[in-house]
């Protein structure tokens, strides 16, 4: 509806077209590359960030050899994770009790650009950037998230893609593993004085670790193809003012044979990797395209600026089981004795026509916009001041055009009995148009660093509902709902350097989540407070942070992935909620006789995560809430401990990941076994050998001890975590 906004197009053309020519004839020699602005990157030293910020750099990522973003993020305290299919394809990420479902309460970015399919209109991140092609991950939990938006109740996650190399470079990483897994990562690029480029691809597939009942069976894995191309033009070495024009194109195609259908507790105990026959046709398909043009200018003095125009298209269709004989699969699996007939159909017994309903969750998304940032470097006596100003004009849309087919189960095989037309189940469009501005300042005076900032969001949203018997939408919408929000989001961080090693830090900021299009729910906001200390020396790094988040109102959004409990897309007010906890990070790397021993510990102790008021709700994860009920999917304890050995030619890392038991539905007191994920510990191993500077090999074993554990109970039954999975890889670098 808004794809060709004349204001947006003309603004992009004007900003990108003017400055580049203005300085083309300058003649002072400046050969340094212009660094790309990133969230944390504007601070020269992460140890001096006046707030909780973590950077997982390229070296650490290389040592992990991970394609699963969830296993990567276990290295960061205060980040809560919920597995889904075992491979990290659709991660559920929360920060400091913000909620995990589809990472909807964090700002998800790639290279500083919003990357969720529709960040405002439909924030659930069914698309997530491919971890294998990332060179770094930035996690912000403190007041610095004010500069990002729009979803700051949790924080921000910025994925850093592979940069254009400084010289000719070629990298190839091929690994093979259990379940017929084959994963290839390749990139090649070069930098010239004026023209630089990069091409990168990831090709990954697996047959999966689950077994489908019945004579048809089938794979339960995935097939992923990801391509990125970058082209960069820089002013030549005689330019006085450095400038760069950068183009980025990405395409991702994914098919995964995945389902929301889990198991009963009894069936899980017998065979956790079983899948019922009724899920044999369940399949997730998606395509994602991204286009970016970025202009960067650096005067080498007072200011530098960056402007990016972007467009993202995302298509997904998740064809998956919706109901059986008129009952939800969740209800059947929770009480298979009462629903014995329905349970029989799930497991392969012959049914009547249309007893099995499978929904095509067909959706199209787009997001586009332009964002700019200018950094001003000023000085007032002994005080250094950097002022960062930003502007974003953004629009996005979600188009739901879903239908639901009927099947008969016949001796373990699904037989199509009724094919429904497109749009006959859900036919609606939601969109958002946004203007956001921010200003944040970094002031350095003696041993003090202050970072006051404020963000303004002006959001207009519309939801258009069309008749389910009007697939062409020629009759116009049957219902139009509009809502808007204008909000100021302030934040303030402070850091004091006690010595070269010791720092004290504190921060406060407002967390905010915009409402859904057409929603009548109250504002989802909270006040986030943190305070702690940081020690950083050559041999030891320690950080301890206490955080307290006070929600004025927590909003829950009904999705299939939460287990439903209302009309999909509806929102519920959860009232006042308090979340508090302690984050601890310890890292050291002592050396003995030429062998280093890297050690790290990441611990999160959530001391409180509870509703302060009671209310009635049909929202699945909450239900009817009483004051004092604990939030679902927030474990009290999370721990990751890693021990390694490293020499010139080899390294070995062993990591233990522990998560205490969690509720899958709000409650207090005794844990209900059917609404609980028990505590579990998962061990991972990585070992590598470098033959020379070009060639190396490695083995990686996820879940080394083959721990059987429940990854999720929602939306429909028990689903397992990844069993022991071993990989062998070879890496070549030119």
Image: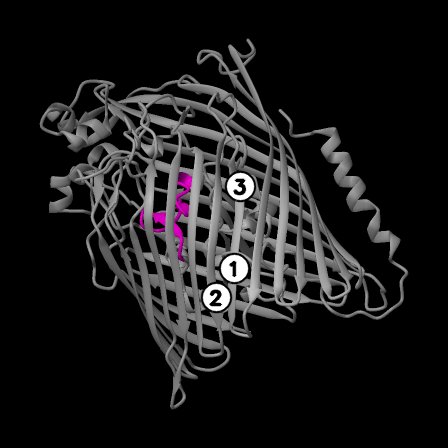
In percent of the image, x 43 and y 84: which residue is there? 648
Helix, strand or loop at mark 3: strand
Mark sitting earlier along the chain (3/2): 3
Q: Main secondary structure of the magenta part?
A: loop
Give coordinates of residue 232: x percent, y percent. Answer: 70, 57
On the question of residue 110 being in view, the answer is no
Q: Is residue 97 magenta?
A: yes
Residue annotated with mark 2: 534
Q: CA distance from mark 3 to mark 1?
A: 17 Å
Q: What is the span of residues highlighted in magenta in the rendered image?
A: 77-102
User: Disc number at residue 505?
Assistant: 1
**How busy is the neighbourhood of tag 3: few (under 14 within 10 Å), some, or many (20 plus)?**
many
Alpha-carbon distance for marks 2 and 1?
8 Å
The numbered disc on residue 510 is: 3
Q: Residue at x 54, y 37 (%)?
A: 119
The answer to whether residue 355 is above or below residue 150 is above
Report crowding for label 1: few under 14, some 14 to 19, many 20 or more residues within 10 A (C-alpha).
Answer: many
Q: Residue at x 30, y 37 (%)?
A: 259
Q: Which one is closest to the eye, mark 3 or mark 1?
A: 1
Image quarter in which the C terminus is found: bottom right
Q: Secondary structure at mark 2?
A: strand
Question: Are the residues flagged by discs 2 and 1 in contact, CB closer than 8 Å?
Answer: yes
- In this rendering, is residue 279 above or below 147? above
């Amino acid at each position: 509806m808004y794809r060709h906004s004349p204001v947006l197009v003309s603004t992009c053309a004007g900003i990108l077209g003017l400055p580049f020519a203005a300085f083309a004839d300058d003649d002072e020699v400046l050969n340094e590359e212009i660094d790309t602005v990133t969230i944390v990157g504007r601070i020269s030293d992460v140890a001096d960030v006046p707030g909780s910020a973590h950077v997982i750099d390229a070296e650490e990522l290389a040592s992990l050899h991970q394609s699963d973003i969830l296993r990567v993020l276990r290295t960061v305290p205060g980040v809560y994770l919920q597995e889904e299919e075992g491979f990290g394809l659709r991660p559920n990420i929360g920060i400091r009790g913000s909620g995990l479902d589809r990472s909807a309460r964090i700002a998800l970015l790639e290279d500083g650009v919003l990357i969720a399919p529709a960040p405002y209109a439909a924030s659930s991140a069914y698309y997530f950037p491919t971890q294998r092609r990332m060179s770094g991950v930035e996690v912000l939990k403190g007041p610095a998230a004010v500069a990002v938006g729009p979803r700051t109740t949790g924080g921000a996650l910025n994925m850093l893609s592979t940069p254009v190399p400084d010289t000719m470079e070629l990298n190839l990483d091929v690994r093979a593993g259990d379940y017929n897994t084959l994963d290839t990562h390749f990139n090649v690029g070069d930098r010239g004085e004026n023209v630089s480029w990069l091409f990168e691809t990831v090709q990954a597939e697996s047959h999966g670790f689950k077994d489908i009942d019945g004579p048809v069976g089938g794979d339960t894995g995935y097939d992923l193809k990801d391509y990125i191309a970058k082209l960069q033009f820089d002013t030549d070495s005689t330019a006085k003012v450095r400038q760069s024009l950068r183009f980025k194109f990405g395409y991702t195609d994914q098919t995964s044979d995945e389902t929301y259908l889990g198991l009963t507790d009894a069936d899980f105990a017998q065979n956790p990797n079983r899948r019922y026959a009724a899920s044999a046709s369940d399949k997730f398909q998606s395509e994602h395209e991204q286009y970016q043009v970025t202009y960067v200018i650096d005067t080498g003095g007072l200011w530098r600026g960056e402007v990016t125009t972007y467009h993202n298209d995302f298509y997904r269709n998740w064809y998956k089981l919706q109901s059986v004989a008129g009952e939800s699969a969740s209800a059947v699996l929770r009480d298979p004795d009462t629903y014995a007939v329905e349970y029989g159909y799930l497991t392969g017994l012959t049914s009547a026509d249309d007893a099995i309903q499978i929904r095509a969750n067909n959706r199209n998304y787009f997001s586009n916009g332009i964002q700019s940032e200018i950094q001003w470097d000023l000085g007032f006596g002994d005080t250094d001041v950097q002022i960062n100003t930003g502007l974003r004009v953004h629009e996005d849309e979600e188009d739901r055009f879903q239908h639901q087919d009927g099947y008969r189960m016949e001796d373990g095989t699904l037989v199509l009995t009724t094919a429904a037309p497109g749009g006959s189940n859900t036919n609606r469009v939601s969109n958002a148009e946004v203007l956001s501005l921010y200003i944040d300042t970094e002031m350095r005076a003696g041993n003090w660093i202050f970072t006051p900032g404020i963000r303004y969001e002006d959001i207009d949203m519309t939801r258009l509902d069309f008749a389910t018997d009007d697939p062409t939408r020629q009759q116009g919408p049957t219902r139009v709902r509009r809502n808007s929000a204008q909000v100021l989001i302030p934040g303030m961080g402070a850091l004091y350097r006690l010595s070269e090693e010791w720092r004290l830090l504190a921060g406060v900021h407002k967390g905010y989540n915009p409402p859904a299009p057409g929603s009548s729910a109250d504002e989802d906001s909270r006040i986030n407070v943190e305070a702690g200390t940081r020690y950083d020396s050559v041999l030891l790094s320690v950080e301890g942070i206490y955080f307290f988040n006070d929600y004025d109102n927590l909003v829950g959004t009904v999705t299939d992935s939460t287990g439903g409990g209302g009309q999909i897309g509806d929102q519920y007010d959860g009232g006042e909620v308090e979340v508090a906890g302690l984050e601890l990070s310890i890292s050291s790397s002592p050396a003995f006789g030429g062998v280093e021993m890297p050690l790290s510990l990441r611990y999160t102790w959530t001391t409180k995560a509870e509703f302060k008021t009671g209310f009635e709700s049909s929202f699945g994860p909450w239900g009817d809430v009483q004051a004092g009920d604990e939030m679902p999917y927030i474990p009290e304890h999370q721990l990751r401990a890693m021990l390694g050995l490293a020499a010139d030619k080899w390294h070995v890392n062993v990591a233990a990941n522990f998560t205490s038991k969690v509720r899958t539905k709000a409650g207090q007191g005794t844990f209900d076994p059917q609404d609980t994920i028990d505590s579990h510990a998962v061990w991972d191993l990585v070992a590598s050998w470098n033959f020379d500077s070009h060639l190396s090999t490695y083995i990686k074993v996820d879940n080394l001890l083959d721990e059987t554990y429940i990854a999720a109970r929602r939306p429909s039954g028990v689903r397992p975590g990844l069993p022991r999975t071993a990989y062998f890889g070879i890496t070549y670098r030119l």
